[in-house]
Image (spheres, rainbow, N blue to C red):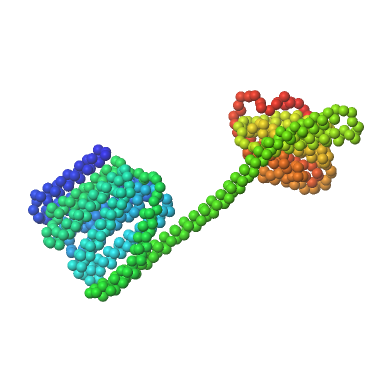
Amino acid sequence: MSTGSKLWLATVTAAFVALVSAAFLLPQSFRLAAFSDVIQCFLLLSGTASFIPLILRSRGRLRLFWSLITLGVGFWLSYQLLWTYYEVVLRRDVPDLFAGDVVLFLNIVPLMAALALRPHTAQDEYAARVGRLDFALLIIWWLYLYVLIVMPWQYAVAELAAYSHNLNSIYLVEKIALLLALVACWIGSRGHWRRFYRSLFGACLTYAVSSYIANWAIERNQYYSGSLYDIPLGAAMTWITWIGLRQESAAPETEGGAVSTVYGVWIARGGMIAVFSLPLFALWSLSEAGVPARVRFFRLVVTLAAALLMGIMVFLRQYHLDRELIRLLNHSRESFDALTRLQAQILQSEKLASIGQLVGGAAHELNNPITAMLGYSDLLLSTPLTPEQQPLAAKIGQYVRRTRSLVASLISFARQGPAPKTPVDLNTLVRTAIKLTQPQWEPLHLEIRTRLDTALPKVLGDSNQLLQVCLQALGDCLHVMGERGGKILNVSTEREAGISLLQIATEPVFSAPATAPTQAASPNPSVSSLDPEDGLGLSACQGILQEHHGHIALTRRQDGGILLRIELPAAQLIPAKPQTATVPVLWQSQPFA
């Protein structure tokens, strides 16, 4: 507690000591009544002001909590000011049928509303909103009870005995309800909150007992302002200030943990019971014997007004409930769709894993005969052959190499996984791929023309996987040229708006009209197959490029040629020191005819 708070508390304690001393030392007089009333106003003003710093420092539900606590103490202060106005300013007793009694009754309503917020527990926005509506029903019900039971004997038919009895009875029930709510919050909290609720319960219990004793003394004409009956009342007022100042130095925070739904269920049930009790009170008003007709009519009108108001609140609650149910239904549908997609992905992953295991086991058996066939085809090409036999032997070697490439692509496609990525020069990969595919295009007497951008930005990726993409793309294009004709393959790289672009295009197989439209490349990472064999290797390339956030598109032109377009995002990195290349670079400056 700060020094200022200690001085504040010391001043309030001194005022309470003065109140006690006056009760013991001064006789019944106007001076004693005035002194006691002013001291009590000062104590309640201090109690109200002690919670204002908590309101200013808090946010959200906690700020609303402290505001309601302050409002409750403020109502108590307002009632004391009215009492002081009559006894000190007007110098006469407070009327027996006092209109300000409703202010005294209302001072407990904000305290119960504050406890309904339960700031010591975590709540979502929906639970807090609906909970406030449920408790608002109960608050209106309490006000309805006061107007129904007390006010008819004040405004419809003035009868002091019935008014005093009904007021004391309903006020006692209200105080008991507040004490029970404090006990529930006390038991359900811990730490700073537990100490706060315990202190507030002590202050409210002291006030309830002192109020009951004062009413007992009033009925026997033994009470007067400043008497000994005001001492426990002044103690409760001083206690309120101590609670507020103590929380200023140790403001409690909301406790975490799971939120129990039991409280919300009982609040909702209480609100419904309050609504259904209105017809019962209406029947009671009609059936009560010996009640004047004006009182009966007053109660019926009040019951109808309360039914209308509470019906509107029930409608608002149902509206919020329907919106929340719709939101939960949409969320459930989205979760179900996401689960369905996840199951499909898991099934696909299991299939790919099975393919990987199958291919891994058969790879050795497949590669051995393929290697033998490739060796025999090369040996056959080195022997003297007739002009008719030469292209046939070359095609044997071409198809064997293509089969080996397809097997490698299938293995890579089934066993793709994340790999470390580093800046890679795409031009170097292209030159290396052209050199490695030389045994495939030289026997067919094909020509590869390159146009590589020397200022091409590097791409971020795995050099081995990207080299495989280049090899597969060149191999597929060479295979199409061997099948459908064509002698020149154009390979180019260039940069476009933050991407590095690789294009592989075959020359036209036959002449086409100049105005003939061409098929646009797909903007999505998809492959347009030329025949059933073309898509397998490029599918593996597609998987690798997706992992590198790239795209591949295969387009067949009207003139019979094809265009393969590969896009990779440029690496936005500071150039690093030269490192040992993972791709051979000894053909970087070698031209290809």
**Residue 137 percent location from the top left of the image:** 35, 61
Left or right, 290 with respect to 395, comes to left
- Residue occupying the point 20% across, 54% down: 209
The answer to which of 478 and 555 lies nearer the viewer is: 478
For the N terminus, the quadrant is: top left
Is residue 331 visible in the rendered structure shown here? yes
Which quarter of the picture shows residue 147? bottom left
Left or right, 180 with respect to 216, comes to right
Left or right, 404 with respect to 278, comes to right
For the C terminus, the quadrant is: top right
- Residue occupying the point 39% across, 45% down: 257
The answer to which of 30 and 504 lies nearer the viewer is: 504
Left or right, 451 with respect to 275, comes to right
> How many numbered marks appear?
0
- Residue occupying the point 81% across, 46% down: 514
**Residue 304 percent location from the top left of the image:** 34, 69
Is residue 544 visible in the rendered structure shown here? no
**Residue 564 percent location from the top left of the image:** 73, 40
The answer to which of 87 and 423 lies nearer the viewer is: 423
- Residue occupying the point 32% across, 52% down: 115
